Image (cartoon, rainbow, N blue to C red):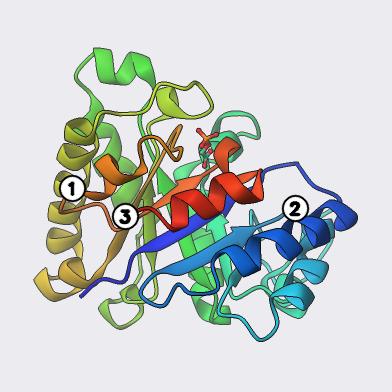
Amino acid sequence: MRQPLYAANWKMFKTQAETARYLDEFLPAVREIRDREIMIAPPFGSLMIAAQKAEGSSLIIAAQNMHFESSGAFTGEMSAAMIQELGCSAVILGHSERRHIFGEDDELINRKILAALDAGLMPVFCIGEKIEQREASQTSEVLRRQIEAGLKDITVERADDLVIAYEPVWAIGTGKTATPEIAQEAHFFIRGLIVDIFNAQIAQNMRILYGGSVKPANISELMSQPDLDGVLVGGASLDPQSFAAIVNHS
Ligand code: PGA
C-alpha cells in the first residue's frame, strides 16, 4: 500500500536559527508517527542545519529546486550532488512558482527529474492548472501535457522513486482549497495517465500528493479521498504546531 507522505514546502522562509527552533518544536510533536512519512523542504541555506537536526529521526529533507547539470557555469544554481551533500534525499521540481515566476517549462523540468533520479534523489514532481485553464475546461489537457512532457524518457524501472504533487495554481497561497471531490477527480485522472505512461502496477504504487491551501482544518477531509496519498503544504507548514497538527490528523 502507498505510505502517506506529508511534505512541507517552506519556500523562501526560515533562516538557520529559525529552522533549528522549528525542528526543536516539531520533531517531538511527531515522534510517535510510524505509518506516515514526513518531509521538510527548507531553503538552500537551511538544508544542512535541518539535516543535522533530523539525524536519528525518519524526517526526509528535500530541496525546493536543483539544476540538471552536475557542474558548470550556471550562476546561482545547485546540483544534485550539492544538495545531497547538504543532507537532501529528495527534491521538489516543477513547482508552479518555478514555472510561472522563473519561467521553467516542461522540458527543463523533465531534465531536472531525470538528473534527480540519476543521482538517487526522490523527485516530488509538481503539476497543476491555472484558474483560466480550469474555467476553460482545459484541466485534463494541461495535466496530460505536464505529465507526458515531465516524465518523458523515464523508464518503468525508475518510476517507482517518483512522487507527483497535484497543485492547482488557483489554490496555492490563496486560501481556496480544492474541494475533496475536485482533488480526487484530478488525482484519479493523473493515476490513469500513469497507467498509460508506465503500467497499472506503477500507478497503483505511485504517491500523488495534493497541494494548495492545505491546513489543519481541511486535512482529514482531503486525506479521506482514495487517490490522495499525502499533501504538500506551504503556508500552514511554517508553524511547527500547525504542521504537526496536519501530520497527526486522524
Ligand atoms: P500553500 O502552498 O499551502 O501555501 O497553498 C502550497 C505549495 O505551494 O506547495
Residue 84 sits in quarter:
bottom right
The total of numbered circles placed on residues is 3
Element type at marker 2? Answer: loop
Disc 3 within 8 angstroms of ligand 1 (CB): no
Q: Earlier in the sequence, mark 1 or mark 2?
A: 2
- Residue 23 place in picture, x, y as percent: 72, 62
Q: Say which residue appears at 37% left-offset and 28% top-offset.
A: 177
Q: Say which residue appears at 43% left-offset and 34% top-offset.
A: 212
Q: Give, as a three-letter code, the residue at label 2.
A: Pro
Residue under numbered circle 1 = 225
Is residue 249 rendered to the left or right of residue 74?
Answer: left
Asked if one can make out residue 158 in the rendered structure from this viewpoint, the answer is yes
Element type at marker 1? Answer: loop
Disc nearest the viewer among 2 and 3: 3
Residue under numbered circle 3 = 250
Q: Is residue 120 above or below residue 105?
A: below
- Residue 180 place in picture, x, y as percent: 22, 35
Disc nearest the viewer among 1 and 2: 1
The numbered mark at residue 43 is 2
Q: What's the CA distance linking mark 2 and mark 3?
A: 29 Å
Is residue 13 rendered to the left or right of residue 99?
Answer: right
Q: Is residue 76 above or below residue 46?
A: above
The numbered mark at residue 128 is none
- Residue 35 place in picture, x, y as percent: 35, 75
Is residue 178 rendered to the left or right of residue 31?
Answer: left
Asked if one can make out residue 68 in the rendered structure from this viewpoint, the answer is no
Disc nearest the viewer among 1 and 3: 3
**Given contact means CB atoms under 8 Å apart, are the residues at marks 1 and 3 in contact?**
no
